Image (spheres, grey):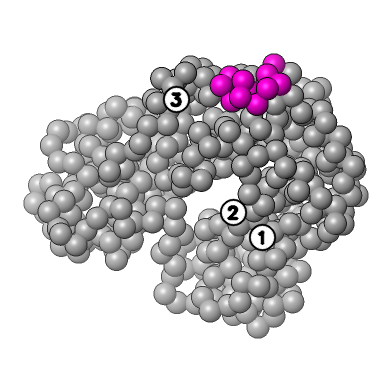
Amino acid sequence: MNSCKQHVFAAPPPVSERHVQALWYDGTLRPGDLRTVDGVPLRVVDPGVWNLEAGPDFRNAVVEIGTQRRRGDVEIHLRAGDWLQHGHVRDPAYDRVVLHVTWFNGGSAPVPPSCATVCLGDFLRTRTDFSPDEIDLAAYPYACLPATPRPCEGVFARAPDFLVEVLRAAGRRRLEGKARRLVARFMRTGDRAQVFYEEMMAAFGYKRNADSFRALAACIPWRELPTDRAAAYEALSCAAELEVARLVPWQRTNVRPANAPLRRLVAAAALFAGALPELLVRLSACDLASREGQLAARAILCEAGPLGARRAAAMLANVVTPFARAENRLETIPGWLCPEEVCAPMRLTAYRLLGRDHNPALYAGNGLLLQGLLQIHREFCLGVHPDCGGCALVQAAGGS
């Protein structure tokens, strides 16, 4: 059985592609005297927007290569040959790439004709003041905040009560959307328990491995999960390696030890082994519209095993509460939810809305307001670059 786990959960290499992305994005880490592999001076005017979806790693970058200024996308790889291995040659999404950034030199790839290549490793490997271990990968792409105040700070920093109203409305918008998607899944599958199981398993995977955990729940439905915790864990871990890894590769880089897939499988087995129907009954008995009911539901999720209160609160907000709303057991999303951990996107959005020196107590004690920060981040902040000009949120709030 150990052989099943060794491959899936193997340690990542010392320098990963994520490291190279952070080095390119963060001007305090990126060398200033860059040259392309052909020896042409390279100046980074704008590293681009860190792309969190499919396609090139950075969008709309601006670089000066020699005397020419180029605007386009940037793709990051460990090795030049990864361009070919990753299938970018025939993918039109990569036609606008103007710079290929790698860690290792040597080799070549049929990149677009106008694309130059720079090898960051050539500038950093021999530097005694550089260590990849000092890069907090979990902080990116949100570690680099603008040096100047954002327009929304001018609107909300002086009106915190108004901001709380906006966050509460945004949080409800986010969770109502989740509830509507659950209703659609109820209609498609006819098995509400399986839908709940799959959504909770995806939550165990966090963002990095949500798809893999969801695929694992489909591979071993809740009715086929062994009732013994140890047996359930063995079944899940082997299916993770033998079945799921072939379809949805596990993401092992940029994952904190506490969020590692192996540890999350232990918690999932403890929660679901032979207990899903009882779990649903107990959660349904909690009045989630009240603070007491929220705390009781969180305690139920924490009973089974190694699941902290903050992670249980995130599952309660993202799955249990929308599930109750989808089943019409809640008239509306409650105004208070158990607070979860303040993640990087929430923190970045709060900095933008209130400035760097604000008091997090304004939102950190209410999970609904934290969900509102996520909704604003995804609905507004991700689409506005680089100076927040024309932000629809600021315009709607009465800003310039």
The residue shown at (83%, 31%) is: 278
Q: Main secondary structure of the magenta part?
A: helix
* Residue 252 tag number: none
Left or right relative to 184: residue 363: left
Label 3: which residue? 5
> Reading the chain from its start, which is encountered first: label 2 or label 3?
3
Could you give the CA–CA distance between mark 2 and mark 3, rounded to whole angstroms? Answer: 35 Å
Q: Which one is in front in this view, the residue at disc 1 or the one at disc 3?
A: 3
Q: Which one is in front in this view, the residue at disc 2 or the one at disc 3?
A: 3
Image vertical order of residue 30 relative to residue 179, above or below: below
Q: Which residue is at the front of the view, 350 or 230? A: 230
- Give coordinates of residue 279: x percent, y percent: 80, 34
For the C terminus, which image quadrant? bottom right
Image vertical order of residue 228 relative to residue 382, above or below: above
Packing grade of label 1 (10 A; few <14, some 14-19, many >=20) is: many
The residue shown at (58%, 68%) is: 350
Region rendered in magenta: 224-236
* Occupied quadrant, residue 26: bottom left
Q: Amino acid at mark 2?
A: Arg
Label 2: which residue? 378
Asked if the residue at tag 3 contacts the one at tag 1, i.e. Cβ–Cβ closer than 8 Å, the answer is no
Label 1: which residue? 370
